[in-house]
Amino acid sequence: MAEGVQESRRQDGKRIVACACGQRYRVPIQAVGTRSCTKCDRPVSLAPTPDGASEHAGEKLKVFVSYSRKDKDFVLWFSDALQAQDVNVFRDLDDILPTEEWWPRIEKLIAAADTVVFVISPDSVGSEICAREIAVCEKLNKRIAPIVLRDVAGHLLPGSLAKLNQVFFTARHEFDQALATLAGALQLDIGWIREHTRIGELAMRWDSRGRTGGMLEGEELKEAEAWLARRPKTAPPLTELQRAFIERSRQAASDRAKSDSDVILGLNLYAQKNYPAARDAWTRAANLGNPAAMTHLAKMLGDGVGGAANPQEALGLFSKAAALGDLEAMTFLGFLHESGDLGKTDIDQALQWYRRAAAAGQLQAMANLSGLLVRMGDEKDAAEAWRWLTYAAEHGYPVAMNGMGELALAGRWCTQDDREAERWFCKAVDHGNANAMVNLGSMHERGAGGATAAAQLYRRAADLGNADAMVKLGALYLRGAGVDQDFSEATRLFVKAAELGHAGAQAKLAEGRRSLDGLQVPLPAGHFDFITCPQCNTRVRKSNAERALESNPQLQIDPFATALACPNCHCEFRTDKLLRGEYDSKKPARGYGFWILCGAVVLAIVAYNLSH
C-alpha cells in the first residue's frame, strides 16, 4: 500500500498507522492528513480506518520467489498470477552474477518477505544460488512455501524442504486450483508472520548499527511481547537476533525507567540545593544513557556545582546528549560555541547547533539563533531572525516575547512602534520575565505610566534577582520618585546589585567609598569584605581603612576611622583593637550621628554619579 496502512482503535485513545515499509507510528484516533516515514521518506496516511479494521488491513502479502533461471518462463507467469491475488512479489529475473553488490540485495529482499516460495525443479535443487537463498531463509527463520514445478526425488531435496507440505504446479495438476491452495497457505497466520518479518528487519537494522539505538519502546515493546506470547504452533520460531533485540529493548526500557526516576530525583535535590546528591543522581542516570541527565550533569560539571568543575567532561556529555537527540544539549553546544567558552568562538558551529535544535522545535534555540543573527547584523539574515523569534514568541517563550518588544522599541528590522513593544513586554511580564519587567518599567518611567508603575515593575524584577532592576529601583529611592525617599534602601539595592556583578553599581559604590574614606587604597570592583560584631555576631561591612589595617596591622591610622557601629545591637568597636585582640568591653555607640552624616555624603555622591 503506497501511503501506509492503519491499525484498529485502541482503548487508550491511540491507534497505529504503518508505512508500507513496515515502520509504525502511534497517533491519536482523530489524527488526519499525512506524515513522512522516518525510515523510507514515503508519505504515511494518518486517516482513520473504520472500526474493526485489522492491524494490517490493506497491507499486501510480500513473497520472495526463489527459482532457477531455467524456470524463468514459468516464474513470470506464476508471479503475474500471484500479483493478481493482491500479493507483492519480489523476484530477480535479471541474468546477473552473484557479485558482492548483488547478493546483499537478495538478502534484503528475503528479509523483507513474509514468505519465501521455492520453485522445486531439478535445476533449482542443483543451483548454488538457490541453496544460498534457502540458507538465508533458515538463518532468518523465514516461512518457506515449496511448490513443485518438475518432479524431483525426495532424497535430493534439502532437509528443510523435504519435511514441508508441497503444492504441485506440474503439468498434470490444475494451475488455478494449485494457485488457490497456495494462496490459502500464504494467508495462514499472516498477521503473526508479518510481525515476524517486521521485527526481523528492525533487529537486523539494530545489529547493523552496533546494537545501539532503534530499539522497541513503550507501547510498541508491549505489543511485541504480546505478539511473542501468542505464537501459533505452525509459525516459524524467532531467530536468536530477534530474541536478543526484544530482550535488549526490554532491558533498555527498564534502564530508562530507572534513569527517568533519577532525573526527577536530581531535579528535586537540586531545588533543595543539595547539589552533591543531585549530581550523584544525574550521574547514575547518565551512565544508563539518559540524555536529559547528561545535559543536567554537564551543566553542573561546567559550573563546578556540587563538586569540582570539569569543562572537558561537560563538553563530552553535552555532545553525547546532543547525539542522542537532546534538544537542550544542542542549544547549550550552540551557546558554548557562540560565547567562546570552549576556548574560541565558532559562529558557524553555533549556528549549526542552534538551527538543528530550532528545526526540532526548541524555543530557546530559536530565540538564541535569532539573537545571534541580530548581533551579526547582516541584513540578509533579517528574515530568518525575525521568523525564528516570532515563532518562539507566539508559542509562549517569554525571552522571545521580550526580544520582540526590544526590536519593536528600537525599530530594528521593523517599524518603530511603542505600542507593539509594550504589548510584547506585557506578555513577557505575564510569563514572569524579569528583563521585560525592567524594559516595561523604563517605558513607564519615561511615559504615561509614571515612576510609581515603574517602581512596582522594578521591585518584581529585583525580587527575581535582576541586577538592572535593583539599580533602577535604587535610583528611584534616591530621588524619591514613585516611592518614599529612602537612602538606606537605595544603598542596600546598590550593594546587592554590585554583589551580583553589576559593573555600574560596583563602580558607583567604589567611587563613593573612596571619596568618603580619603585613603588611596585600591578597592576592586565588586569586592566587599565583612567583619563580625563581637557583641552579637552581626556581619558589618569593612571600610577602606579597615581593609588597609587588616593588610598591615602596624599602620598608623586615625582610630576613629576604624570605629564601627553595629546596625543590630548598636555597640561600637574599633577594628584596630579587634584585629589586635584588644577588644575587652561593650561600649555604647559613640558619634553615631557622624556616621549617618557620612552615609548621607556617600549617597549624595552615588546619586550625583548616577545622574551623570
Image (cartoon, rainbow, N blue to C red):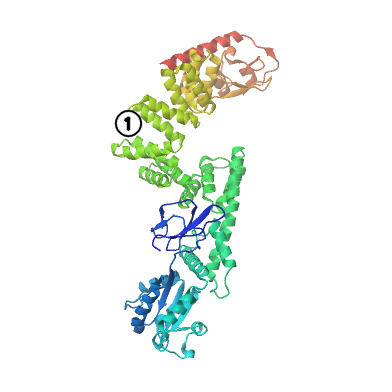
Query: Quick one: 201 or 71, which is closer to the camera?
Result: 71
| Depicted 60 relative to depicted 596: above or below | below
Helix, strand or loop at mark 1: loop
Query: Quick one: 18 or 376, which is closer to the camera?
Result: 18
Q: Is residue 576 left or right of residue 485?
A: right
Residue situated furthest right in the rendering: 585
| Depicted 97 relative to depicted 426: above or below | below
Q: Position of residue 122 (x, y in %)?
A: 40, 88
- The quarter of the rendered structure image containing the N terminus is bottom left
Q: Position of residue 269 (x, y in %)?
A: 61, 41
| Depicted 526 relative to depicted 517: above or below | below
- Residue at 48 percent across and 22 percent down: it is 471
Q: Is residue 515 left or right of residue 373?
A: right
Residue situated furthest left in the rendering: 380
Q: Position of residue 56 (x, y in %)?
A: 48, 64
Q: Is residue 95 left or right of residue 290?
A: left
Q: Check disc 1: other Cα within 10 Å, few if <14, some if 14-19, many if 20+.
A: few
Query: Quick one: 343 or 422, which is closer to the camera?
Result: 422
| Depicted 22 relative to depicted 143: above or below | above
Q: Position of residue 7 (x, y in %)?
A: 49, 60
Inspect the image, locate mark 1, and give the three-letter code of the amino acid beneath it: Cys
- The quarter of the rendered structure image containing the C terminus is top left
Does the image show residue 341?
Answer: no
Query: Quick one: 189 or 423, which is closer to the camera?
Result: 189
For disc 1, the marked residue is 414
Q: How many labels were placed on the picture?
A: 1
Does the image show residue 584?
Answer: yes
